[in-house]
Amino acid sequence: MLRIILANIILFFLPFLAYGFWLWLNNKAHVSEHWRKGPMAWLALTGIALVGVSFIIMASIKQAPDGAEYRPAHMENGVFVPGRYE
């Protein structure tokens, strides 16, 4: 679960990082007005769109084969048996 949360946080901040890198390449990053007058709403909307697309992709990827039943992880004779599809 932590991997999914971190991936979505990175996806949200990716447009901000790209904009900051673009300002740095153009030697405008030292002037803070580019950040204040910059397209912050567009960057936020782009980040939200990236996160939304990642949710759609994750929901559409099927983890189990058709007709498979999930067996949760359990202890069997003192040995840990990981969860699996049967």
Image (tube, helix red, strand yellow):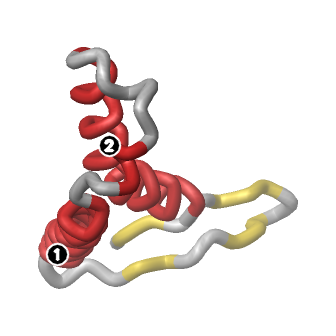
Query: In which quarter of the view is residue 86 placed?
Result: bottom left
Q: Which residue is mark 1?
A: 56
Q: Residues within 10 Å of mark 1 (few under 14, many from 20)?
A: few
Q: Residue at x 36, y 70 (%)?
A: 85
Location of residue 19 with respect to 25 vertically, above or below: below
Q: Residue furthest right?
A: 78
- Please say if the residues under marks 2 and 1 sit with CB atoms less than 8 Å apart: no
Q: In which quadrant will I find the N terminus?
A: bottom right
Q: Residues within 10 Å of mark 2 (few under 14, many from 20)?
A: some
Q: Residue at x 45, y 65 (%)?
A: 84
* Of pointers 2 and 1, the one earlier in the residue sequence: 2
Q: Secondary structure at mark 1?
A: helix
Q: Residue at x 34, y 47 (%)?
A: 16
Q: Which residue is mark 2?
A: 34
Percent across and percent down for residue 36 are 39, 55
Query: In which quarter of the view is residue 42 placed?
Result: bottom left
Percent across and percent down for residue 52 are 22, 74
In this view of the protein, which residue sits in the foreground, 66 or 16? 16
- Horizontal side of 44 relative to 32 (left or right) equals left
Query: In which quarter of the view is residue 82 placed?
Result: bottom right
Location of residue 40 with respect to 49 vertically, above or below: above
Percent across and percent down for residue 67 are 17, 83
- Horizontal side of 57 relative to 5 (left or right) equals left
Location of residue 20 with respect to 5 vertically, above or below: above
In this view of the protein, which residue sits in the foreground, 11 or 40? 40
